[in-house]
Image: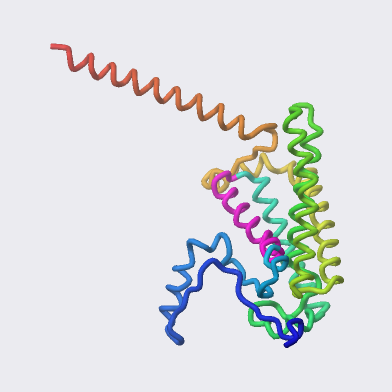
Amino acid sequence: PDVLAEPNYRPLSLTFIEYLDGDKLGFILAWFSMLPFIYIVALCTLIIFRRDKLGFILAWFSMLPFIYIVALCTLIIFRRDIQTIMYFGGFVISGIINHYLKITFKQQRPERTRHRMDFYDVYGMPSGHAQSFFYFMTYLSIFLFLKSQGSSTTYIRSIRNRCLLLVQPIAAILVAYSRVYLYYHTIAQVVVGSFIGTILGGLWYYFINYQFIKYVSFIIDQPLAKYFLIRDYSSIPNIIQFQYDSECAEAKRCRARYVNSSRDSIMLTNIP
């Protein structure tokens, strides 16, 4: 049989969870059973050609936007940095724009994908994956480029930032290409999505770092921001080194207080 005409598909997943048809509780518990894998593969269901090694690799590249979003949300939860929160906010705006552009253009996806519309939007112009990942990479590339030009940046950090600048467009192009290779989008849909994502990334970076930054001090001083421990790290050149030094100093002070407290307790005990 013609393999290209009748391809065999399978979901990209590390496990297959089954439940009894019609069992609502079983359906819910099946998803809970998938939680250990949800950060890797259960955020979306990708379909790839059986025995297609390149398709398998590109399917993982196609998942990079979802993996990136999970990593970004984790960073927001533990860092509470307003710049990172606004970076994610730009992605949300990009997603809203992408949704309305799709229902405006109403351009169908490639014909070979239309029978899989149970999992995906019917319309494909522009590509959401390409738009979101090019937004992420454009914003981050501008950030790293400007950081690497700073006077406080060491030679090693500058080299690292430049390597990241090289990797990011390659990753973004592979994500966009994977959407075409896997027949989720046409070339035009991916090109338009990439272009819109790039423009949005540049505009959002300018807005956050040249307009919104003027109001950051006011925002983080509000009671609600203090309640959620929202902070601004933009003025700190090396946040990892800063956190390391601060936490080590605080740990030493805590140990010193504990030793002094223990010594005072022993002295009081020995007093007749």
Question: Residue 66 location, x and y as percent?
Answer: 64, 61
For the N terminus, the image quarter is bottom right
Question: Residue 220 location, x and y as percent?
Answer: 62, 42
Q: Tell which residue pokes out farthest to the front in this image.
A: 1
Name the residue rendered at 48%, 26% in the picture.
250
Residue 39 is covered by the magenta coloring: no
Using the image as rendered, state which of residue 153 and residue 220 is in the foreground.
153
Question: Residue 8 location, x and y as percent?
Answer: 66, 81
The chosen color scheme is rainbow
Name the residue rendered at 67%, 54% in the picture.
88
Using the image as rendered, state which of residue 192 and residue 46 is in the foreground.
46
Question: Where are the magenta residues, as a range?
Answer: 58-80
Residue 77 is covered by the magenta coloring: yes
Using the image as rendered, state which of residue 181 and residue 25 is in the foreground.
181
- Tell me which secondary structure the magenta stretch mostly adopts: helix
For the C terminus, the image quarter is top left
Name the residue rendered at 77%, 75% in the picture.
124
